[in-house]
Amino acid sequence: MADKEVKYYKLEEVKKNADASSAWIVIHNKIYSVAKFLDEHPGGEDILLEHAGKLATEDFEDVGHSQDAREVMKDYCIGELHPDDRPDRDYPEKGAYAEGSPPEKFSFLKWILPAVIALGISILYKSYMAS
């Protein structure tokens, strides 16, 4: 779709394409016609049909799709959601920093605190068993 002019669709038109013969799904304001992909989807066709005719960005990102899945999606993109129908705020793309991202900052609460708590429980257990 990169070589063509972008085609915009209204949400009402997307909602009309909500069955197995023409399943359209909106992810990050792009519209994907996934009817031909139903049999190939690793999660099964039911999940795609459940989201057909709807905005599915949040559920798509919550599942944690791979970079390969995002590449495959490009083949099914037929256009974009009309700017008037777009949500006020788009759900963040979780895979956006998959490659070349800065390392996660060290978090005291994430690593040190659980280790200290485990050590404290261990010491309490040993002193309880010794008495």
Image (cartoon, rainbow, N blue to C red):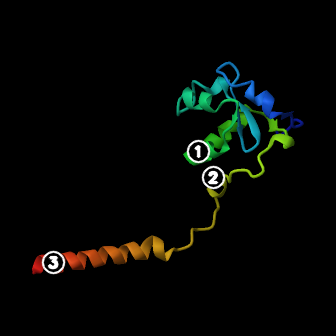
Quick one: label 3 or label 2, which is nearer the N terminus? Answer: 2
Give the CA separation, mark 3 to mark 1. 48 Å
Residue 19 image position (x, y, % from top left): 66, 22
Residue 4 image position (x, y, % from top left): 87, 35
User: Dividing the image into 4 quarters, which one contains the N terminus?
Assistant: top right
Give the CA separation, mark 2 to mark 1. 8 Å
Q: Residues within 10 Å of mark 2 (few under 14, many from 20)?
A: few
128 or 26, which is in the foreground? 128
Say whether residue 131 is left or right of residue 114: left
Residue at numbered disc 2 = 95
Residue 129 image position (x, y, % from top left): 12, 76
Residue 97 lies, with reference to residue 58, above or below; the image says below
Tell me what residue is drawn at x 61 percent, y 56 percent. 98
Secondary structure at badge 3 equals helix
Tell me what residue is drawn at x 47 percent, y 74 percent. 109
Residue at numbered disc 3 = 128
Can residue 64 be seen here? The reply is no
Amino acid residing under circle 1: His
